[in-house]
Amino acid sequence: MSRFYYKNNIAEFLVEETSTVLGKLVQEHEFALEDQQKNSWVAQIELLKVWLKNTACEIVFEYSIPRMGKRIDCVIISGATVFSVEFKVGAKSYESHAITQVMDYALDLKNFHEQSHKVNIVPILICTHAPDQTPFLELYPDGIAKTLLTNGQSLANIIFLAESQFAGLKIVADDWLSSVYKPTPTIIEAAQALYRGHSVEEISRSDSGAINLSKTAKVISEIISDSKINGRKSICFLTGVPGAGKTLAGLNLANSWHNEDESEHAVFLSGNGPLVDVLREALARNEVETARDNGEKKKKSSTISKAKAFIQNIHHFRDDALETTKAPIDRVVIFDEAQRAWTLKKTASFMKVKKGKSEFNQSEPEFLIGVMDRHDKWATIVCLIGGGQEINTGEAGLHEWFSALKRSFRNWNIHISSKLTDVEYTHGTALYGECDIARVHIHDDLHLSVSVRSFRSEKVAAFVKSVLDCDSEKAKVLYLEVQNAYPIVITRNISCAKSWLRSKARGSERYGLLASSGAIRLKPFGINVKNSIDPINWFLNDDKDIRSSYFLEDVATEFDVQGLELDWTCVAWDADFRHDGTEWLRRSFRGTKWQAVNDEDAKRYLKNAYRVLLTRARQGMVIFVPTGSIEDETRLHHFYDETFNYLRTLGITEIHEI
């Protein structure tokens, strides 16, 4: 895919025939071309020839933003400034969605385009029939200007104004255009981009300091190919820290092998209901929108059906396998969050109560491996494993997968990384014994060690781990390392926390309110975790919809957000996970009071719940810890004060007002 459709210096552009420029744009366009698009291009070309005749700049049409599946209408490079221009030919007013769109382009360039990190970027919205506005350049701290609105008449003045205000080295257009692009899309953006046909290399970082999904994809593809050629059955365990790209790797694999032919069919499976629902809906909406942009019509109902074939709920896959003893069509299955598969006890209880199968005696991992073992020659299972991510009763963790392999499937080859010995995966006990070593194969590319969700700092996951492990000295050091790029602040005022979120987000950057499912006593602050959200509305709808995360009225819990992410979050901290000055205490609210949590599994789930909540933000977070009340025995001051004091001793900045 070409990074742009047309590029020239302004002198040559001015003398080039409009039809010639149009021809070059048409030649690069990948889709069926509607008259509306052609007419829009002609209008843009002719207007820019008038507006820019006295400038000295470089002009680029249709610059690609793969992460978003969009193209910037026009990029103008002049002096030390990049101008990102969005055209609305014929528009009589400056609509908010268009203002958001052009800011999103500027943010993408600033965050992910290497040559744009240190230059000033000016987003401009041109609505050709709207009243012109007097240009005023005001920069955010990162060098992005607040969006300028014009009907085009003042475009040259904006360029001259920037040249006079912004010092710096002159940008070399060819260098800028050939710059490395290192996007870190959200999982929703990544799924959409892969579904549209982009490669994982186009939408993910591949620098030495970050994940290399290409290597991970390569080693898993080699395992699949070897299994097919030699008639083997193989299981891979892909591990990684929160936000490292495990789900993206799985989606990429499913997309790469999906429908190649019936003998190599692959499917992405997840037991995470909110993740499945949100991704399917996002894919369907995006396909309808893309079709509309290309002059086609598609019904969302048909696109949803297509998305369901790509991303399936693991429990539906399981239930289908209960109805037959035949092998499934899928030779390759990717199990997302495989550590959350059910124990024997939970699976047997479910089968007895919900399915009427009182004699069922397999854990979910054992049953799922058994389903793929029905294939007569080869099959491959890829398990995506997050360390410390089990958050609910009955989730088996990694041990049950290995127990099932030892117990019932000794013909399966096992592929892991050397990191699988870490305590967050093993809980301190060995996963396999000496007798299994011959069939265990080590590939270090099966571990993703760097979080790229928080693309501004790769050490956020490590900081959160040290906080939860009460390793305060390490946490202090890590906080100093992440704070400048990835702001983390704390407050005891919920209104202040919400204002902070709103002040940080630009364009369509998404923010939201998070709390643990056990945070029952945050209700006096309008945070009701018992009020279920619709994840589709919360994660996908815009800031005009009261059901969306933007309104900060509905709170999402660890069950809603695991596997998903936002740009900015407020984590509301209740007394269910409280610090006593030395260690974390776990409490569960029962009836009218807090009760101690003594079960070791339940303790781990609660710690992991906060791990999930504290690693959802891509760009920064505010932590809200209430002050408590002497009039309410369920919210006494000391339930919260020690937690607040502990977090403050780590160096986390306190905010009082915005």
Image (cartoon, rainbow, N blue to C red):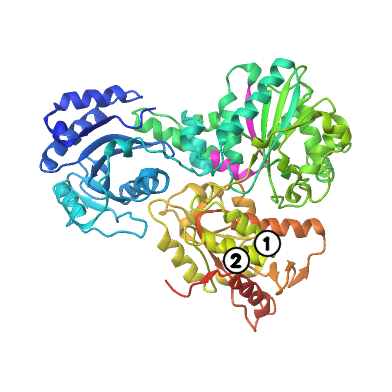
Closer to us: 101 or 470: 470
- Residue 557 showing in the rendered view: no
Q: Is residue 361 left or right of residue 323?
A: right
Q: Residues within 10 Å of mark 1 (few under 14, many from 20)?
A: some
Residue located farthest toward the front when viewing the structure as drawn? 169
User: What's the CA distance linking mark 1 and mark 2?
Assistant: 13 Å
For marks 1 and 2, the one nearer the N-term is: 1
Q: Which mark is residue 468?
A: 1
Residue 266 versus residue 480 in the image, above or below: above
Spot the residue most to the bottom. 630
Residue in front for this viewpoint, 224 or 371: 224
Q: Amino acid at mark 1?
A: Leu
Residue 100 drawn at (x, y percent): 35, 50
Say what secondary structure mark 1 lies in: helix
User: Within the image, what quadrant is residue 556 found in?
Assistant: bottom right
Residue 30 rendering spot, x and y as whole percentages: 35, 24
Q: Residue at x 42, y 57 (%)?
A: 505
Residue 640 visible from this viewpoint: yes
Question: Which of 307/409 is in front?
Answer: 409
How many tags in the picture? 2
Quarter of the figure that contains the N terminus: top left
The stretch of residues the image draws in magenta is 265-279
Instruction: Estimate how packed mark 2 is, as few (under 14), some (14 to 19) or many (20 or more) residues with alpha carbons within 10 Å.
Output: some
* Residue 138, position as x, y percentages in the image: 27, 60
Q: Residue 633: x percent and y percent?
A: 69, 79
Q: Which mark is residue 476?
A: 2
Q: Is residue 625 above or below residue 328?
A: below
- Judge from the rendering whether residue 323 lies leftward or rightward of residue 466; answer left or right: right
